[in-house]
Structures are given as C-alpha cells and as structure tokens.
Amino acid sequence: MIRHYRVEDYHLAATLSSGQAFRWRRLGDGWEGVIGGRWVLLRQAGNILEAMTAGPCSDWEWLERYLQLNVRLCDILRMFPKDILLQEAVRAWRGLRLLRQDPWECLASFLLSSNKQITQIEQIVSELCGRWGDPVLVPPDHEPTWSFPAPERLACRTEGELRACKMGFRAPYLLEAARQVREGKVDIGALSSLDYEAARQELLRLKGVGEKIADCVLLFSVGFLEAFPVDVWIRRELARHFFSGRCPSDRELRRFIRDFFGPAGGYAQQYLFHHARSGKKTGADSAPAQPKQPN
DNA sequence: CACCAGGGTACCT
DNA sequence: AGGTACCATGGT
C-alpha cells in the first residue's frame, strides 16, 4: 500500500542517518525500516514523501507520528540561538528532523550505545531483532525482517544469550532494564506526563543509564526538545567553539547548554552532531579535520 | 594495527 | 564534588 505526503523542510536521508534510530537501511533510492511492527519503505523526491507498506494499511497515524509530519520546522528553527556554527549546520542540513520513536526500542538501543560506534550499534540491534523479534510482513522476494523485541521477550533471556549479540558488558544493563520495564518498576510510558527533570530522574534509576542516554531517550522518543545529549562529538564541538578549546566541567557545560540553547536545545544539538559527524565520515579529503582536544 | 567509539560505574582523593 | 581505571567489541 502506498501513500504520499507533501512535506516542507524535510530532509529524509539526513533524518534517518543522523544516529537517532538504528534500523534504517538504504534500499534503492529509498530507505527501509520497521516502525511498530510494520515494514515500510520511505522515498523522497523534492517535496513529496512516499511511503510504502508491505500489507494493507488504512490508518497512517503511526507513520505520521514517527516522522513528526505535523511539526513545522521553521517554528523550531526560530527558537535556535544566533550562532555561526549552528547556522552553518542548519544551512548544510536544513530539513533534518527529530523522530518520535518507541520509548522501549529507543531506551534499549541507547543502552547498547555506550562507547560504541553507530555502525556497531546497528549491528547489535539487528542481531537482537533477528533472534527475538517477531517476523514482520515484507514484500514478495524480500529478505525477512523482524520487529524490535518487546521487554518481555528480552526479560526471560540470560546474560549469556544477550552477550552472544556482541553487546559485551552492556548485557546485564539491558537484561535488568527489560525486567524493570516489564514489571512496571520503571514506567517508560508515563514519562511524557512528567516534566523534563522528573522524567530524567526516572530514567536515571536504571543501571547503565546516565545523563547522556537519558537525554537521548527523552529527546528521540518522548519529545522533550530541551533534552541535550552530550556525547564525545558534541563535547568536542562545544569545547572548541564556545570554550576556545578549553574543556569545561560537566556542571559548567550543563549550565551553558541550558542558558544558551534553551527550550529547543536538543534539536539544535542534532544539527551540530550530524554536521560534525558528516564532516569526518567521508574520508576522501585528508584535511586535519579534528585536531584532537584534550578531554 | 593502534586508536577510538552517540558512556557509565565503581572507586579513589 | 571532581578525577580515573575499567568495562567488551570491532570499525576505520
């Protein structure tokens, strides 16, 4: 089943490859992925966004919500602070969006993200889905695909089984999180009814979840746009651009982020992250891209 | 092939 | 409160 949308300021490729979701893969001139148990192929041509599902589909709310099609990007960009680096990132990647992902898949994925490259995270997530996800309907002659395994599916595994997916020391974290979520001891569905700080504290109760991962979950799956994940890339960029290369303390950096970037800081963060990362991953030019900053 | 990766924890001053 | 070794794995 096929559906078309007219979109404004939407950069599908940047959005799906910016390290906020880990299950999208190029297929021809489009992108294939799984959203809420449905296989979908997305393709963009100018202002037309085409979505194709494998089976019949009458209600497309799941897709519109995931892609945040109702959000007017210009309303977001207006909230950005005036800054050369940020303006450069927006000029280069205008249309980059924040998705609204499933909280459990997002939490589990970023629990596996610590100290790993994005490509490795994608591999581990793929392993998880293949082993314990449910098969999803795909087009004829297409390779099989699986949904992201629910908490109950992972909660009854052993640490050893999870380690077999190459997640290493993160295995007990994921296992424990799956059990806490299954038991309702951590209610990730209720995060959106809390304020940002309270939701953050709730996530921080999970072992293996620190400030960075909590902010990723709140930004990518709950919709708290002030959540500002600080990873090694962002820390480098902020130190270089706003602190003249000096390495600010965590508290100092936190305060600066809140005061300078404001209520849509997380959105700005995604532009800075994608811009910084896209400058380096094309190893074509051997320019001294990142003079290593002391941490 | 060293180095580092969308970090966090435990343990130390 | 602020610093650091260590964690498991593999991409580049």
Image (cartoon, coloured by chain):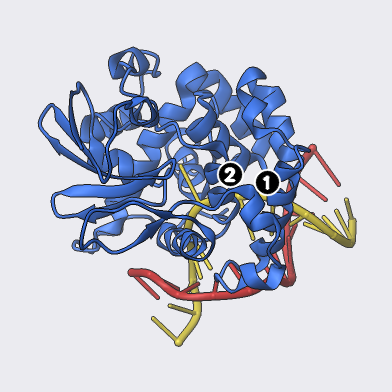
Chain colours: A blue, B yellow, C red
Most extreme residue toward the left, as rendered? Answer: A46
Task: Indicate the secondary structure of the residue bearing disc 1.
Answer: loop
Please provide percent x and percent y for residue A254: 62, 31
Rendered residue at 47%/25% (across/down): A265
Disc number placed over residue A209 in the picture, else none: 1
Please provide percent x and percent y for residue A63: 34, 31
Rendered residue at 36%/17% (across/down): A76
Q: In the image, what residue type sits under mark 1?
A: Val
Q: Nearer the viewer, residue A270 or A207?
A: A207
> Mark 2 and 1 residues: CB-CB less than 8 Å, in contact?
yes
Disc number placed over residue A200 in the picture, else none: none
Query: Pointer 2: what residue?
Result: A107
**Residue A181 falls in which quadrant of the image?**
top right
The chain letter under disc 2 is A
Residue A9 higher or lower than A279, as above or below: above
Task: Give the distance between the C-alpha atoms of the residues marked 2 and 1, in whole angstroms.
Answer: 9 Å
State left or right for residue A107 relative to residue A97. Answer: right
Residue A123 higher or lower than A150, as above or below: below
**Residue A71 falls in which quadrant of the image?**
top left
Please provide percent x and percent y for residue A98: 39, 31
Say which label, 2 or 1, has the lower sequence index: 2
Rendered residue at 70%/60% (across/down): A156
Residue A128 higher or lower than A210, as above or below: below
Q: Is residue A129 visible?
A: yes
The N terminus of chain A lies in which quarter of the figure?
top left
Q: In the image, what residue type sits under mark 2?
A: Leu
